[in-house]
Amino acid sequence: NGIQLENLVRLSKIGAGNSGTVVKTLHVPDSRIIAKKTIPVENKEVLKNQLVRELTIMKNVSAHDNIVGFYGAFYNPSTTNEIVILMEYMDCGSLDKILSVYRSDCHRKNVSISCKTSWFNEMPLSRISFCVLNGLIYLYDCYKIIHRDIKPSNILINSKGDVKICDFGVSTTLINSLADTFVGTSTYMSPERIQGGRYTTKGDVWSLGLMIIELSSGEFPLGGHHDTPEGILDLLQRIVNEPAPKLSKNEHYSIEMTDFVNRCCIKEERGRSSLKELICHDFICKYNNRDTIAKEFRHWCKKVKKRIKEDKMIRREETERSKI
Ligand code: ADP
Ligand code: MG
């Protein structure tokens, strides 16, 4: 099932982030939609060969329900300073995109983001947490891989009801070639990581906790997102110095969910719960032991996909109108 780059036709740009650009493409021979990620790298033959070799183990690693499918890594001979990664296209996009569509929806309807009827109520959050934990446990148990970059844009959803993680640290060469730049800095990093400590799976647990707070409240904890380097450094300082973030006191968060988040967001790494402790937590079991959960969550995903489409149409109309 080898895919050749020349059989891909560009459809549209999906997004760009710290490490590269992602484009939606059509694989003409079998009409499959594929996500194509391009990462700029130093133009050194040895480096690029090394990268492609390391990324190739992704073929085996990605054979899991909660890991995004991988179709191959190349370095593009025509544009020498980049590598290309082909992966499964996820039609509901990433959690940050879904959150921003939900935010616009609330804004238009003039309702609060953390209301009782929030898209990100407990059922989807419990399902998403279960899938992320399940994927992380698999990566570590089978390959000793630590994700290192858990954040909403690296959690992908499709309308079949799958939740899959992507962009984890498979390649030390890639990690090292990105590490020297500001690119390696993320506000989802744990306090020990910000302070230059080593990375363990507990670092990913911290990131998961922050992500749940952000999705349920609509805001990044500890004073929001900052796009300037100074703003980010300031936020990182606060993560290290201030008390751990918490779910805001709100009567509609259950005891289970509040406790789950508290156990993820313990600043001291040793006190923080492990992946395996968390996957057995009541907040996970409460929903994921129901035999109807897969169906309920699939329904949620379908609804989300519909809303994303509607949002796109509304935006298009708005820009059309602003031209007149
Ligand atoms: P970042 O994760 O830092 O935002 P990336 O370059 O990894 O940057 O991804 C850019 C965007 O592309 C992501 O925010 C996500 O919304 C989207 N994306 C990435 N991979 C896929 C995929 N396989 N299917 C659908 N959307 C994707
Ligand atoms: Mg990413």
Image: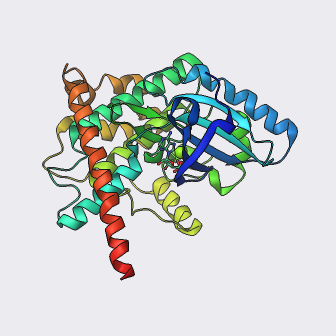
- Which residue: 27% across, 34% down? 126
Residue found at the far front of this picture:
29
Left or right of 175, for residue 190: left
Q: Position of residue 188 (x, y in %)?
A: 48, 48
Q: Position of residue 111 (x, y in %)?
A: 17, 63
Q: Quadrant of the N terminus?
A: top right
Q: Quadrant of the C terminus?
A: bottom left
- Relative to 321, say whether 55 is above or below: above
Left or right of 101, for residue 47: right
Q: Position of residue 29 (x, y in %)?
A: 58, 30
Model colouring: rainbow
Asked whether 133 or 313 is in front, the reply is 313
Residue found at the far bottom of this picture:
324
- Which residue: 56% across, 62% down? 233
Total marks placed: 0
- Which residue: 39% across, 59% down? 222
Question: Do we see residue 198 in this rendering?
Answer: no
Left or right of 303, for residue 149: right
- Relative to 23, say whether 69 is above or below: above
Asked whether 164 or 29 is in front, the reply is 29
Question: Do we see residue 299 in this rendering?
Answer: yes
Asked whether 270 or 250 is in front, the reply is 250
Quadrant for residue 4, please give it. Answer: top right
Q: Position of residue 34 (x, y in %)?
A: 53, 37
Quadrant for residue 303, please give it. Answer: top left
Quadrant for residue 209, please give it. Answer: top left
- Which residue: 39% across, 63% down? 223
